[in-house]
Amino acid sequence: DNESWISVPSNSHRRYTINFSGKVRSLGSTVADLCFVARGSATGTLLTRCAIWDLAAGLSILREAGGIYIGLSGQMPDLPAMAQDGSLLPEPVLAAGPEHLDRLRAVIHPRD
């Protein structure tokens, strides 16, 4: 509905086409974004250019709350490899409750 919201990076309006029917917000904190999703306040979040230290705590909280995450391509990010070499996410990742993830993947697309 129009009161639902997702969190996105501040430059997402330049990099993605987002056809979400609710609100689109940029909070500036990966962990806060993931915690809002975990507690059910936000429908989901789009994560980009994050390192493992940006993700580890928030993804643990998200998983414990029953949330899931996946790359926009449908591939799971290789978190152990990121931890080993200090690399950033290789692609954008969506995090949401299981009931919302497919719908969000259908409305967020990278621009050419």
Image: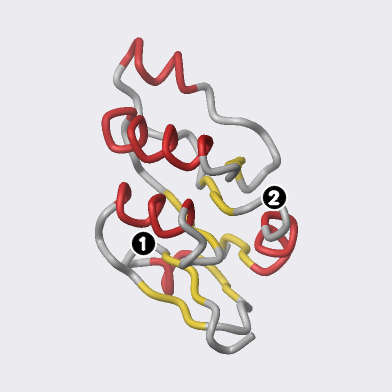
Q: Residue 46: image x %, image y %?
A: 48, 56
Q: Nearer the viewer, residue 18 or 44?
A: 44
User: Furthest-top residue in view?
Assistant: 84
Name the residue rendered at 68%, 60% in the picture.
Answer: 100
Q: Residue at x 34, y 40 (%)?
A: 50
Q: Is residue 65 above or below residue 6?
A: above
Instruction: Identify the residue position indicated by label 2 in the image.
Output: 98
Q: Residue placed at 33% from the left, 28% from the top?
A: 52
The image shows residue 54 at horizontal and vertical percentages of 29, 37
Q: Which residue is mark 1?
A: 9
Q: Secondary structure at mark 2?
A: loop
Three-letter amino acid code at disc 1? Pro
Q: Position of residue 102 (x, y in %)?
A: 74, 56
- Secondary structure at badge 1 equals loop
The foreground one among 112 and 75 is: 75
**Tags 1 and 2 touching, CB below 8 Å:** no
Q: Amino acid at mark 2?
A: Pro
